Image (cartoon, rainbow, N blue to C red):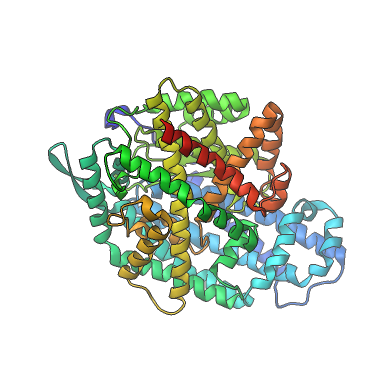
Amino acid sequence: MFTKTNALPHWDLSNVYPSLESDAFAQDVAELKAQLDALDGYLDANQITSGAAPASDVDVLSGVANGYLDRVNAAQGLHTTLHMYVYCFVATDSYNATAKRLFSQMDMLRSRLLQAGVRFKGWLGRIAPLLPQILERGGAAFRHAFYLQELVQQSQYLMSEAQETLSTELALSGANAWENLQGTICSQLTTPLERDGKTEQLPMSVIQTLYSDPDPQLRQRVYEADLAGWESVREPLAACMNGVKGATVIIDRRRGREDALHAAIDESRIDRATIETMMGAMRQNFPVFRKYLRAKAARLGRQALPWWDLYAPLSQSERRYSYAEARDFILEHFGGFSERLANYARRAFDHNWIDAEPRRGKVGGAFCDELPTVGESRILCNFDGSLSQVLTLAHELGHGYHSECMVGKTELQKTLPMTLAETASIFCETITTDAMLAQTSSAAEELAILETFLSDSTQTIVDISSRYLFEKEVFERRAQSELSADDFCDIMTRAQKATYGDGMDERYLHPYMWAWKPHYYSMEYPFYNYPYAFGLLFGLGLYAVYQERGAAFVPEYDALLASTGAGTAADLAARFGIDIRQPAFWQGSLKVVEARVGRYLEL
């Protein structure tokens, strides 16, 4: 277990802006407002609205489209930087009142960008028959051909312009507010835990790191404290969930969507058949994961695995990594793949782009996001020295490398589908896992690495499946009425029983997994669960191609990452001979997991 003397880093934001109160920050906020005013004026002057009859002259339309794209790219790049800069403070200190106020302001400015986008999308839908000729004229429109074609396709799912504008404005004090409340509650919540003979009041982000502690009695107390913590805030969190899901149901119905999944798969740039094929392959392999879970229970001396042992190490002496050891290992093996990847990660470590210390007021989990105007990323994790956290660090660095490969693209060209957003992260995690397995010096060490891989894979395949089932039922029932905290717990428990099956002790599941997962509380990203499974299986498939092709694969891989904003998942996968619509691909990736379960059982 780390201590404060280990000096885990906090990220450095000083090269972005000196502070939230600095003149430089205020000047860029003013500049963004001016750009948004100019963008609104441009839309008005050129009658970019779904209500006005558009011009029919292709040259005029081409010029108008080019002008819009240039303006919105500039405004979006500045907004993304400002928004992420402020969120870095909110995510690490939810008590920072200045940051929270400014974050709300950033949300309001973002709503203006969204409203401009709705106007343009409606206008583009009306001139859709002329789009091929507009693209032939070149310029920004030609460079954004995929983006424009996608907008035309999605323009059929728009309410009236007035309704879309009202929806965006109301979201600030509706769904977005519920989402922000959930984040605040979770980051500030503490719960008492007894360890080392004394009781401490610990943040939930720290509580969650203790599930990997080698002491089984402590892990059980962690589980009990975890449930008690969420029990204490179940009512406000249930209200948050009802608010977000209720708003999503209404807006989807008004837009003519089949259901909430419809919008999610369009956002993911896949079709319903693809997700059904992938989820079907996952279900068929549940017995493999249950075999692993039962074997883990036996290794821990149990007949069935309780929730608090899901992340348990298999021995009291399982290796812990210092942050410096994690850094050196990642850099060495990233370098074995490509110097470009290693150089990116080195910059992230050397320039303090990573915030690693768990602490009160900081959100749990991990993420990576970019700051476009400075061409950098920032990574949040909650490092506890476990092997799993080393892999999490590699995972988030993969997200940052994905952004690195897209440098030079416009903001609209970098719009990623949720499915492919996990490609580089899973790939980097796989590099690190394989390197660890290749360097094992004993059966015990190999077993520990396999345990971490299989534990994480179980979360990505089995637990993600439970989250998918949970969200599907919540949406269906929320369309009829509000749900209680008991309802959410019941749905979650049944989903866990359906997916974990006899791999877990059904007396000790986690009915409050819905309470703290932020993905459930985003109206913008419904069903943000299956993309992680897609990312794992697609990443494993790509890694298999890399093992076949060696160094020749690297430039093709970088080119794939650079173009993930400009193609469907199926078309981009086809570059490597991968057909994501066929069960064989998904089963092939799952065979990698099955082989590692087999080795786990042998040891």
Residue that protrudes farthest toward the top in the picture: 441
Residue that protrudes farthest toward the bottom in the picture: 480
Q: Is 509 drawn above or below residue 43 in the view shown? A: above
Q: Is any part of residue 99 visible from this angle?
A: yes
Q: Which residue is drawn at 38% across and 66% down?
A: 491
* Percent of width and height locating residue 179: 42, 62
Quadrant of res 124: bottom right
**Which residue occupies the foreground of this view, 461 or 24?**
461
Q: Quadrant of the C terminus?
A: top left
Residue that protrudes farthest toward the left in the picture: 197
* Percent of width and height locating residue 502: 37, 53
**Which residue occupies the foreground of this view, 468 or 593?**
593
* Percent of width and height locating residue 516: 36, 56
Residue 343 is left or right of residue 355, and the answer is: right
Q: Is 194 drawn above or below residue 603 in the view shown? A: below
Quadrant of res 455: top left
